[in-house]
Each structure stands twice: as C-alpha cells, then as structure tokens.
Image (cartoon, rainbow, N blue to C red):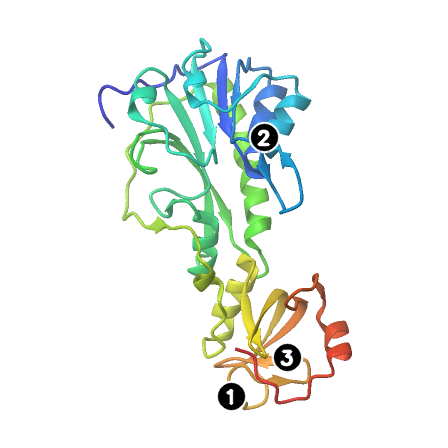
Amino acid sequence: MSLSLPLPPPRPRRIAFAGTPDDAVPALQALAEAGFEIPVVVTGAPRRRSRRGSDTPSSVAAAAEGLSLPVSHDPADLAGCDADCAVVVAYGKLIGEDLLAVMPMLNLHFSLLPRWRGAAPVERALLAGDDRTGVSLMALEATLDTGPVYWHREVPIGPADTAAGLRRRLARDGALRLADSLHGGLSAPRPQAGEPTYARKLTPADRQIDWSQPTAVIDRQIRVGGAWTTLDGERFIVRKANPLADGPDDPPGTLRDGSVATRDGMIRPAVVQPAGRVAIDAQDWLRGARLPSGTRFG
C-alpha cells in the first residue's frame, strides 16, 4: 500500500459510509445499531427503474433516510465530515487516491481476497464451481481490491446456493463481523497472499446457456441468475431449475418429458420467463405451450 495513504484508528467512533445496493444496507444498519456516529452516507444518485417510472433512491439512501442519517451523492463529502474513517460497501465507483490520502477507508468485499477482485465476485465464484467464498475487510487503495486485509470470514457454497442468496448471507455475516471488529479494535492489516483472480462484470454472453456443456456447469449458470437460451428464435430465461443425473440419449438442448438434455444429463426447468412475459412455473407454462417432445432450445 502507498505510504501516503493513512490507516484508520483501531477503534474508530465516527464513521462515514459509502454504498449503494441492497448488499450494502446490512453494514450501514449494523454500524448504526452498534452506536457508531455516522455523519454522512454517500450513495449513488436516484435512478429510473423502468421506462415509465420516476427516479427512485438507492437502497442505501432509503435505509439512511429511515435511520435519519444525512445522504449525499458526492464522494468528496466523505472527507468533509470530520469522520475517523469511512466504510465502503458496494459503492459502485472507484475512489481516487486524492480522497484516500485524506480519509482512511475500509472496504467490505464479498470474496476471499485476493481471489475474485472486481465487480462480480459472488457470481464468478459460483460460475467457477468454488466450494467456498467469503467476505473480507481491507484497507482501501486506489487500485482495484488490492489493499491489505484485516480479516476474512469464510462461507461454504452449497449445491443449491444462488448468487442472490450468497450475497444476502455475505452481506449479513460481513456486517455483523464489521461492527464487532470495529468495537473490539482492528489489528494491523496484512498484505494479500495468493494468486489474484479477477471478477469482471457478467455480460449477456456469460449468461447464455450452451446446452452442450455439462449439467453442473449449466446448473451453476442458472443459479447465478438471468441464464437464458432461445426458443423459436426468441430469448427464453430459465429462472430456476433442477439438475438431473441422467436421461434419454438426446442431443443437447432437446426437450423430453419436461426436461432439457445437456452433455451428460438433464436440466428440469422450474421457473421460466418466455419472451415478453412474466416469470411462470415451468410445468404450467409447458402445459399451456403444448411443446412436443423433441423441441430444441438454443
């Protein structure tokens, strides 16, 4: 870490906060409930959630207002609030070294650093077939997720875990550990050890199902969320599904008895979303669609 970047005091009492989505809310709430002073909450600006909707505040902004905490959309306010340090959780923007030079910052990151630095650590861990993930508290640096680490909290990844469920668990567990560690006093952070991997943001191509892949790979892709294939040339989203060990010897992508063939087994969709429609129980949809066995997806 650059020698010019200050570290927070071991027991900060006045803590600024920066975060934006649902995943950051438990940490903000845990700090408030633990009695820390929070002079400002910096978050992303209000956004329009749909074409016809109006701008709505971020999840963190809504939580801060519920806690009667002041909200800002300017990261410079982190340095202008006389805080001992700032805690950053899924803020969504890089913070420059000029700001880090005057305000020590802690970052709660949802991976076991240095594995899965970057924007989508939970999704990448699940796609890669990792059997565990976790949450880390690190000193924030201007470079991407490279700071020294105060602690890790490890969380196993089960065979039915989804990315959404893992993020909720990591957000909750990380928030509790964060508040406890700040109350108890931070030890000196240690440099990250191990081979870094990078969790780039998922693209639509990352979510497209290739039915010629093994069942386990497709199952993980569906559990990440937003996995899609095509049916009659239109996008078809598989929201939930159950992997099956084996099935008929059909070409990958073939529908047979409510399940779809993969390289080495079958996937039985549970919740699907055809083009232009809302999500629906897969078997209800199949009864209405009356697709013949042998229909091909993808």
Image x and y of residue 21, in percent = 55, 37
Q: Which amino acid does label 2 sit on?
A: Val
The residue identified by callout 3 is 259
Mark 2 vs mark 3: give the one in front: 2
Circles 2, 3 touching at the beta carbon (< 8 Å): no
The mark nearer the N terminus, 3 or 1, is 1
In this picture, residue 161 sits left or right of residue 148: right
Q: Quadrant of residue 138?
A: top left
The quarter of the rendered structure image containing the N terminus is top left
In this picture, residue 172 sits left or right of residue 111: right
The residue identified by callout 1 is 251
Comparing 246 with 277, the one in front is: 277
Image x and y of residue 189, in percent = 33, 27
Comparing 130 with 293, the one in front is: 293
Measure how far apart labels 2 and 1 are at the Cα level.
47 Å
User: Looking at the rendered structure, which numbered label has been put on residue 60?
Assistant: 2
Q: Which residue lies furthest to the left in this view?
A: 3
Residue 26: tell me if it is visible: no
The mark nearer the N terminus, 2 or 3, is 2
Image position of 79 with respect to 170: above or below: above
Q: Residue at x 52, y 54 (%)?
A: 157
Q: Which residue is drawn at 46% across and 11% down?
A: 81
Please state the total of marks drawn on the protein image: 3
Image x and y of residue 50, in percent = 63, 46
In this picture, residue 53 sits left or right of residue 194: right
Circles 2, 1 touching at the beta carbon (< 8 Å): no
Please rate how many residues cluster around mark 1, counting C-alpha atoms within 10 Å: few if below 14, some from 14 to 19, many from 20.
Answer: some
Q: Residue furthest front?
A: 52
Q: What residue type is labelled 3?
A: Ser
